[in-house]
Amino acid sequence: MNFWQTILPVLAALLLAPLLPGVIARVKAAVAGRRGPPLCQLYFDLWKLLRKGAVYSRTTTWVFRAAPGIALAALLCALPLLPAPGADALVSCSGSMFILIGLLALARFATVAAALDTGSSFEGMGGSREVQFAALAEPAVLLALAALARASGTCALGGMFAGTVGPLWQTAAPAVGLLAVALGIVLLAENCRIPFDDPNTHLELTMIHEVMVLDYGGPDLAFILYGAALKLWVFGTLLVNLLVPWQDAARPLAGTGVLIVGLVAVAIAIGLIESALARLRLLKVPQLLLGAGALAGLGLLLIVRL
Amino acid sequence: MTLLLTALVVWIAGGGACLLAGRNRLVAATVGSSTAILGSVLALTGLVVGLRLPVELPWSMPFGHLALACDGISELFVAVAAVVTALAAVFGTGYLRHAPDRKPFGLAWCLFNLLTASMVGVFLAANAVFFLLAWELMALTSFGLVMFDHEHPGVRRAGVIYLIATHLGTALLLVMFLLLGCECGGMLDFDAFIAGGYGPEVAGVVFLLALVGFGTKAGLMPMHVWLPEAHPAAPSHVSAVMSGVMIKTGIYGIVRIIWILGSLPSWCGWALVAIGAVSGIGGVLSALAQRDLKRMLAYSSVENVGVIALGLGIGVLGLDARNPAMTTLGFAGALLHLLNHALFKSLLFLNAGAVRLATGTTELDRLGGLLRRMPWTGNTFLIGSVAISGLPPLNGFAGEFLIFLGALTPLLDPAVSGSTAALTGGLTAAVALALIGALAVACFVRTFGLVFLGEPREAARAEAAQEVGRSMCLALLLLALMCLVVGICAPLACLMVLEAVQQLAGAAQLDLDTTRFLEPLVFVSLTALAVIVVALLLFVLRRRLLRGRIVEATVTWDCGYAAPTARMQYTSSSFAQPILRVVRHVLTAHKRFAPPRGLFPAQAAFASETSDVYEERLYRPLFKKIESLLGRLQWMQHGKLNYYILSIVLALLALLAWKMR
């Protein structure tokens, strides 16, 4: 039973992650009064791309060809570290929060190196912005997770949420709110959503994540798109675990269901945010990210003082 | 111990033999490198056999004994020194083959071997006088090696700055040892030091002197200014030894003092955390601002020494809070990171040497696209970059992971969380480490991308570039392999540092069950393996998918503009600009901008340069002030010998009168 309880979230991530971008696109379309693409559009795209050949720039080396696989591998290895609400993670060890941060950084290293491999100034620009945002987002994530570590007495992601979040909502709801806002801001930044980046933009100069993968096609692009969906799932899972104090020992499997519903809700929220906001000027982005770090630090302070 | 002594003798004798070779390149390289390697093999065998009888030889030196002892702390450092110098010597044989003919090769190899011997002497010394002599020999030999290319004025300037900085540091150490000696009844042996008890005031003063004195050698900010000058100036295999091992003698000194003092007040731990955070963040930001490969690597050494100091600070705070977990994780993380840094930083400096040999420059904005032409250098540089960024499959992650865990321990453990110092110190260290890690990724992905990926920015240079010789590739490959192996076998590597950790805790009467705290490292290894296996599987899958399909080669997408040039690529400064903009009030870039004027502008120019903040705002005004103060004494400097002798006699008389009083 326990085994299923921990492996189901991983299976759900593998199968359902490409659904989230579809949900976001549908919400945005609905707000704009359009019908929008099918919910499963990303599945169709992936299927199409996996059956295609590839075109590579003559400038590129093996780094460019290996990078999508390395980035996807890092994200795949991060999945078992994450729990569903009310359950433990498949792989739970002290310090798994640092392993998660390390794996995300590895994916970033691979993506940016591949971008520089093309020799295109646009892709260099994207890489430069990506590492800047990440440098400011990483301390915010650390502070938010450290606050939860303090509340739960463990720095294993698996044991950090279950049984901690419920009481915390009762004793320190403002602190949890601050952490949630901080994690939400980081989620938007790391997944290149508005107000940090516009995934739909069609001008190379204004793109961040999309511009780094301009030169990919075929199976490589499929890896990248799937990896991006998984990354959204990873950050979304952290947020759902923080926000949903689900603790039902009688139906442990329901945790995965709660997770999926929660993630769809997160996707809807992202869609609404994207519909309501415009992109920030690039120079303002560091301020927002530093703000996220400050909020997380404040949340931590409140929880330490409990 | 006999083997270790033999190794010392081999290094010194080999150094002497090299002198006989004079300017003969081949003889000097053969003798020098073979004795260097032989000595290292002997030393490593000696460590494995592990008979540690302290040696004490008679010596006609006041307060001095020729006392050598090898304990857990020494062992770790000697091992690092032996491995890195041996591989640097292998690289050096090939590297110096390309130096101009009229160089004093015999002297260079002699100094190299003496440098190795003196560093190992520092690690083994059990008497303060002997320690200081070895320390001084180390400073002088490395100074000689830095000055290898003394024809360049920049190199001479670097050498002089280094010589001054290292002696200022040593002066403080002299005071520190004298203070310790006074407290121990005039004995200058380490055994006497550790037997003595120290009040908190004395311990605090000794600790501060050690932090500044040893910190100068280690390159901790703000005592680091010599490091980005001296390391790039030296030949690359020497830079590798200097960054890989020599700056670690400073860390060794701090560790030794922590061991001698036993229990330190909590502010000492806080001081280490603070100076570590400043060095780490300042170092990596300065590294991002550099446009020269070797200078950037030198600043990155400042950063990594900062990370080590963070770990030591956590350990000291743990000792103060009497918490075994925090102590173990902090010290083990610091020492493991030290071992790792020795591996990947020497690898990267050797890579920089290979790049310089192949292209004649280390300026980032003149390079590019070297991975195709220099696959061994390029791929090992990639391994070094991923390792130094602290990313999972390689060794850099393991050390930082332990320091992270140690830093968060006071948050988790109700027993320690009462200690505000431990709590705040730990949190500061954790946030600093997260920032350092993310910035290091930015810094090294930029460097690797600029040097090895993309199009060559100067086509002629890149076309002339060839892979370096076999001996050099061998050294690179071995170091890269070690990074990989330590990453995958992190728990085993950690066993190497455990004895030193236990010794440090033992000196403060704290019992540790070290293995329990290091269990999470097993998961680090598993993660490393998992990432590698999954990535390989995906690579195979991609191969399968693409088999039989059309795979085309074309130009990079350039928005329909079909005539891009290599100079349109992103440069080192443009890549770093967004990050440096955030810290522009601290790290000021000096810009010179001549904008295009008129309807048909003929020319325009832009240059920017980021100089060292501390050098510019602290040391330069300080030394100017000192100079102007001392200038008032210039009337004494008249060049008349009889007056000089008179003043010496007067001073002696005054001393005599004071003594007779």
Image: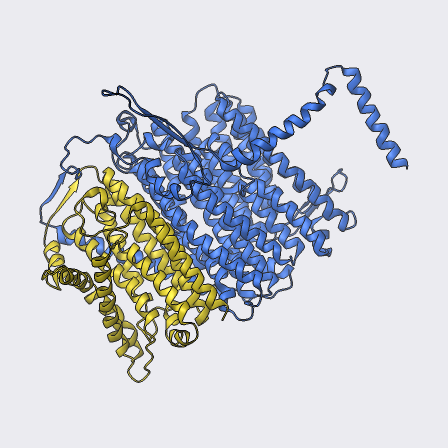
Chain colours: A yellow, B blue
Please state the horizontal and vertical placement of residue B210, each as a whole percent of the image.
63, 46
Q: Nearer the viewer, residue B479 or A190?
A: A190
Q: Quadrant of residue B100?
A: top left
Q: Is residue A78 left or right of residue B255?
A: left
How many marks on residues? 0
Q: Nearer the viewer, residue B263 or B381?
A: B263
Q: Is residue B634 visible?
A: yes
Image quarter (top left, top right, bottom left or bottom right) of the C terminus of chain B:
top right
Q: Is residue B376 visible?
A: no
Please state the horizontal and vertical placement of residue B204, each as a whole percent of the image.
67, 52
Residue found 60% across the figure and 45% down from its top: B123
Give the answer, above or below, for where B90 lies relative to A247. above
Q: Is residue B146 left or right of residue B629?
A: left
Taking the view exactly as shown, the residue that stands out farthest to the bottom is A250
Residue found 79% across the figure and 50% down from its top: B185
Q: Nearer the viewer, residue A279 or A185?
A: A279
Q: Nearer the viewer, residue B267 or B187?
A: B267
Give the answer, above or below, for where A56 lies relative to B467. below
Give the answer, above or below, for where B413 lies relative to B271. below
Residue found 47% across the figure and 41% down from its top: B586
Please state the horizontal and vertical placement of residue B7, each as a whole percent of the image.
57, 41
Taking the view exactly as shown, the residue that stands out farthest to the top is B640
Please state the horizontal and vertical placement of residue B366, each as a whole percent of the image.
32, 29
